[in-house]
Image: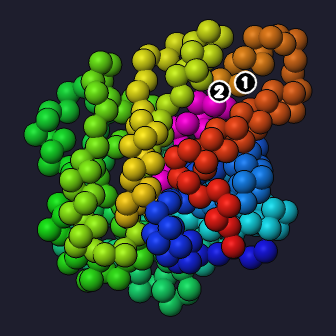
Amino acid sequence: MPLVTTKEMFKKAYEGGYAIGAFNVNNMEIVQGITRACKKLNAPVILQCSSGARKYASHDYLVAMVKAAAEETGIDIALHLDHGPDFETCKSCIDGGFTSVMIDGSSLPYEENVALTKKVVDYAHAHGVVVEGELGTLAGVEDDVSVEAENASYTKPEQVEDFVNRTGVDSLAIAIGTSHGAYKFKPGQKPQLRFDILEEVEKRLPGFPIVLHGASSVNQEHIKLINEFGGEMPDAIGIPEDMLRKASSMAVCKINVDSDIRIAMTAAIRKHFSENPTHFDPRQYLTPARDLIEEVVSHKITNVMGCDGKNG
Ligand code: G3H
Ligand code: 13P
Ligand code: ZN
């Protein structure tokens, strides 16, 4: 089964009121945990690699593992570059077997973001690869981020038509209050997303796929396990699942998850070592880690993205 682009996936997801899960992969156990869940639930999936993942595992290993997963499971898998920092990185992924790239020009001045994104789109489209752009920067998690600074980072709906028309991007990541990592809200703070911005974007770009980054929900049981077995993670608050489900039923067609997988893997390994302090065979502690990733992804596909049974 060759890797696919996200074109068809997003079209069907938009029309069907669900989203596709986009999970970050860094090693074999993560690829297998995710794709086993997708196979079981007959769900299409996006496996995405950051620049950090390419540095850690190397481009060729990542491509080979993802291709092996597509071959073994027979489900639709898109291989996506997450947060491409520059044209060269995007080109290297386009030339090297990825079917989708993100060019993240969100921290650049608007006109520079447009120019860089268009340059990537022109190259990608000439090679049959799709492109995700970003407008607005995700809210920070640092304590000293002021409300004004946070407000300034939300996507401005009045820019989206111009950006999409001038760049030719295939999907657009927007900032509506999600953020990367495990600490998305301050302790005691009520999680909120700016659905008014999403609605306005949807009105201005009917039928166009929107992407949500920073969409981990942070499973409290997993944080508890980490801390019960020697970890010291402070209180972590993620995006409530019902909000993500609502976003999936709207224009959001791609939901990015990385932290939830990291947390699950760490929880399983800490628990395993605490119960089996003499073990030293990596297969012994990576097996429960892979199993818990499969459980987390299965839950998300069914309860958050709603893409179970949507493969093919
Ligand atoms: O959005 C960022 C992803 O979670 C990837 O993180 O750059 O540490 O691989 P990373
Ligand atoms: P989380 O840190 O919420 O998992 O977000 C991951 C992400 O957006 C990858 O691009
Ligand atoms: Zn991201």
Q: How many marks?
A: 2
Q: Residue furthest bottom?
A: 126
Q: Nearer the viewer, residue 113 or 67?
A: 67
Q: CA distance from mark 1 to mark 2?
A: 5 Å
Disc marking residue 269: 1
Disc marking residue 185: none
Q: Nearer the viewer, residue 85 or 243?
A: 243
Which type of secondary structure does the marked residue at label 2 adopt?
A: helix
Q: Is residue 143 left or right of residue 17?
A: left
Where residue 308 sits, quadrant-wise, is: bottom right
Question: Would residue 109 be visible to someone looking at this image?
Answer: no
Residue range of the region highlighted in magenta in the rendering = 255-266
Question: In x, y percent, where is residue 307?
Answer: 59, 58
- The secondary structure that most of the magenta stretch takes on is helix
Q: Is residue 92 left or right of residue 290?
A: left
Residue at the (56%, 86%) spot, across then down: 128
Residue at the (80%, 68%) spot, across then down: 74
Which type of secondary structure does the marked residue at label 1 adopt?
A: helix
Determine whether 284 is above or below 257 in the image: above
Question: In x, y percent, where is residue 90?
Answer: 49, 70
Where residue 295 sits, quadrant-wise, is: top right
Q: Disc 1 residue type? A: Ile
